[in-house]
Amino acid sequence: MYEDYRKISDTGSTSERSDSLECDEPVVPKQRRKSRWLRIVKVLLVTFLSIWGFINLVITAISHVPFLHRTPVVHTGCYCGTSSTEAIAMGCKYDALAAAWLPDHCRDDELTEEFNHSGDGPNGTWLYYRDKAHTMPITEEEIMFLGDTPNARFHMDYSWHEVHCLFYWRKEHRFRFNGKILDPRSDSEEHIMHCGEIWGRKATYGTGTVSGVVFDTNSE
């Protein structure tokens, strides 16, 4: 009987221990779970507001950068007045390649400089003359003011005209990518045909050509 009692006691003891183990499992209070979720939501909200604030800050900064909001200027011509004085006041410069005064948006100074060293004179410069016989030299500084004298002309070797046409074809191509425009008098099929005739003549060495200086290349 004692043994039965001990078995019963042992069994009961084991059962009690098992029950106590099951009751000892940790239980997270609902208040603690709610508090943890609130912290997560708060962190996410602060992170979102920080990102949103940074984006707004960047957008505001960009909106105050002038060159990003500059309206493109549409040029429609290359007019430089009616005299050298007026042309200078308008910001125009004499362009030896065009034999004309041109504003910045109609010039390719780099190409013109190359043209100025592609000639028949010393170091590739061009030789210019006051007369058809090529006996009276004239400088480019003097040529640029010839436009102030009606019907004034300067003379040079025929090769000047051939090289002029070649460089104008290059200028037309370059202006497709640099935002500038070709002076209207040269931006035409007539000018292309004219250059074709110049190249087709096959002039002999020593043949001359002549040009004037203009301020309004929109029509002349």
Image (cartoon, grey):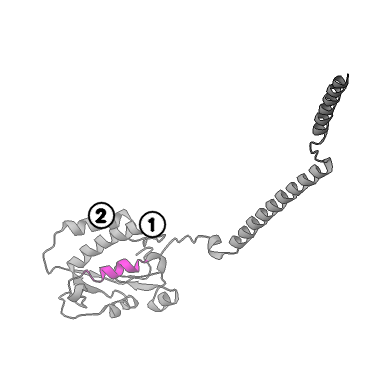
Q: Secondary structure at mark 2?
A: helix
Residue numbers of the magenta segment: 107-118
The residue mark sitting in front, 1 or 2, is: 1
Which x, y percent locates residue 43?
72, 51
| Amino acid at dot 2 | Met
Residue at image x 80%, y 33%? 21
Q: Callout 1: helix, strand or loop?
A: loop
Q: Earlier in the sequence, mark 1 or mark 2?
A: 1
Return the x and y of residue 133 as percentages of the image width and height: 15, 76
Q: From the viewer's perspective, is residue 149 above or below residue 45?
A: below
* Image quarter of the N terminus: top right
**In the rendered image of this protein, does residue 45 appear above or below residue 19?**
below
Q: Quadrant of residue 58?
A: bottom right
The disc at residue 193 is 2
> Which residue occupies 86% across, 25% down?
9
Q: Which residue is mark 1?
A: 177
Quarter of the C terminus within the rendering:
bottom left
Please, what is the three-letter code of the amino acid marked with disc 1? Phe
Check residue 113 for magenta coloring.
Answer: yes
Q: How far apart are labels 1 and 2 at the CA level?
A: 24 Å
The quarter of the displayed image where residue 5 is located: top right
